[in-house]
Image (cartoon, rainbow, N blue to C red):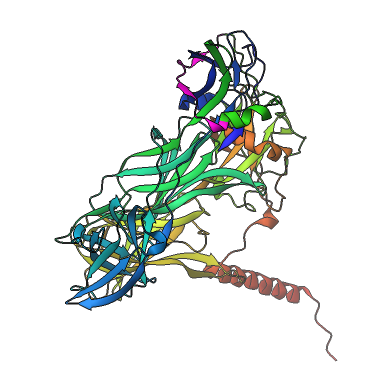
Amino acid sequence: MLTLALPLAAAVSERWSHTQSLNVPAPGLVRARLGIPTNSVARPDLRDLGLEAPSGREVPYFIDRPMPKSGSWFRLEGGAPSVEKGYTVLAARTGAAFAGRRWDLLRLVIPGREFMKAATVEVRKGKGEAFQTVVRNRPVFRQPDGVESLELPVPAEIWSEVRVRLDDSRRDAVPVLGLEARAQAEELPDLDEIDAAVLERTESGEETVFHLSLGGANLMLTSLVVAAKEPVFTRRIELFQRVYRDYRIQEETLGSGSIYRVALEGGTAAESLSLPLSVQVAGKDVFLRIRNGDSRPLLVAGVRLKAAPAFIVFHAEEPGSYSLSAGNEEADAKEYDVADLRQRLTAASGALVSFGPLLNNPSFRAPEALPGVEEAGTELDVAEWPYKKRVELRENGVQRLELDLETLSRESDGLADLRLMREGRQIPYLFDEVGVTRSVPLVLTQEGERDRVSTWSLGLPYPHVPAASIQCSASRPALFDRQARIYSELRDERGDTVRVQLGAAGWTRRLGQGDSAVSIGLGRPPQGSRLTLTVDNGDNPPLTLSECKAFYRSPRLLFKAAPGKELFLYYGRRNVSPPVYDLRLAARELLSKMPGEASIGKEEALSVAPWWAAAAPAGVGRWAFWGVLGLVVAGLLFVIAKLLPEEPAA
């Protein structure tokens, strides 16, 4: 990719945060690599870079970012399967259309169904040569959750014929429609390698999410590798970033695929821990989701990414020390007439020179964060809001406030009632409904066993906890297969309490698995402060549970504010529309800032519901209420009848 860059003023002033020197030994075309530190301080589009010659004049330049080229796939001729003594054998050749092409990867074309086979690959370059075995008993498989491995790596050569043998001795044969080969991919040397720093790790019942720092912005990611410690595993993974779209913060997928490490008895172990990418990330952070399903969370030692480097390319008219300035968020791009230079700049590679260290500009003055965004919004009367909490800020600029479980548990219309208030005026915010996954321990009480079904009571810390799933762990027995169900008591339209199933899941523990956990997704959030867990034991001994946890999504508010005057979060009002702030127009800039972490205080009750808004009694209490009321009415009628004068006798 070759992009025209538009530098700024030549002289480095207080508007640029960093500088770098570049020693050019001779005039001519120059090509210099921009390191990750430079990307980190520059604007995401790199348009704030300014290049100055030794004479002090501005120098036009291009940003060149070459990308690796993935290999193309082509279908091999032949490949019709045959059966030979417990093996499915496929023989294929490259054919005239692809003769003379180097290829390094085979792929089996197998229709969608679950299977696992051991594959052996033999190749040769010509008919007069003997076949040589390059892969022996390597697992190929497809699992119900979508994780699959149908590819077989071979040495990169110009192979003319190939034979693949699938071992059918342990399982039935699978239909194979043919073979495909990949022309050798062109890889770029000296890719930037990034050991991503884990900013945050969150666990839910079925997934692990890593918040990763890239250490730089505007990186062109080419691959990701997960350093997993488990000896055997398969997982689906997704890399995503958060963007503001359709008036809300959403997840944008950057890449998805599978990682695995598997082995067959007596065969070759196979693993794939990488995810190929070809995506530019404007921000400095991304998120990695690992879907665990019913398996325990994967042990991960680290995450490494590779990125295609960026080069600044320009024509040097004089030798000497050139200066590059970077880090000006308010830079205005200039228009340079470089049409005459473009052909020369792209036709030659240029002399490769290196930048010196990135230095801080001592005269730099950091601009105000989001200077066009006013902190305070319109006035609002919050007399009808029943609750508030104090919000504490530690620093100026963009803030992030995570909503606590107590606030989330107050009934409201999709959190549309949230208002940040300071001195009677609203503080505009962006609502990050993606937020972060949190868990809360439940109070576990065993209620006994009846009709071969064990029952436990699960106590929640608040009514109306927005739980999405319940995870429970069992320590005994060592081997079991059960069906678990979660129930909640709800009130119907007549006020009666009924038990409703919220979710169910199979719960299995195999030999040597260790402490076994089950994650039960809930179809709706609980309405009360108590859930019921049942486990059908059949003719087996009951389980011994060690703990249960509820997982919920904790949204966040993003806003701009400074410490000082008191700031409160008001919530709990029903039947109110969500706020609409102009701040959404600056969402991209807001999300690009590293926010300060605001904290939330204790709840303050501001009003009590009037007597006519009190909840009606339910269940037995409901019938007792009406029974007592009926007796009172009957008594009053009896007294009134006694007080009335008797009719005179005729």
Residue 187, by quadrant, is: top left
Q: Considering depth in this image, is 122 or 292 the residue closer to the camera?
A: 122
Magenta stretch: residue 461 in it?
no
Q: Is residue 607 above or below residue 78?
A: above
Q: How far across and down, in percent of the image, does residue 424 sit?
A: 74, 32
Instruction: State the residue lying farthest toward the left.
Output: 266
Q: How far across and down, in percent of the image, does residue 119 sit?
A: 24, 64
Q: Considering depth in this image, is 583 or 130 the residue closer to the camera?
A: 130
Q: Is residue 302 visible?
A: yes
Q: Is residue 75 visible?
A: no
What residue is drawn where x is 25% and y is 66%?
A: 163
Please count the marks in the image.
0
What residue is drawn where x is 48% and y is 45%?
A: 278
**Quadrant including the N terminus:** top right
Q: Is residue 269 above or below residue 625?
A: above
Decide if residue 375 is on the left or right side of residue 542. right
Instruction: State the residue lying farthest toward the bottom.
Output: 650
Q: How far across and down, in percent of the image, does residue 537 sit?
A: 27, 71
Residue 56, by quadrant, is: top right
Q: Considering depth in this image, is 502 or 636 the residue closer to the camera?
A: 502
Magenta stretch: residue 353 in it?
yes
What residue is drawn where x is 23% and y is 78%?
A: 83
Decide if residue 561 is on the left or right side of residue 640. left
Q: How far across and down, in percent of the image, does residue 66 sit?
A: 49, 37
**Quadrant including the C terminus:** bottom right
Instruction: State the residue lying farthest toward the front.
Output: 128
Q: Which residues are magenta?
A: 346-362
What residue is drawn where x is 17% and y is 60%?
A: 267
Q: Considering depth in this image, is 38 or 627 the residue closer to the camera?
A: 38
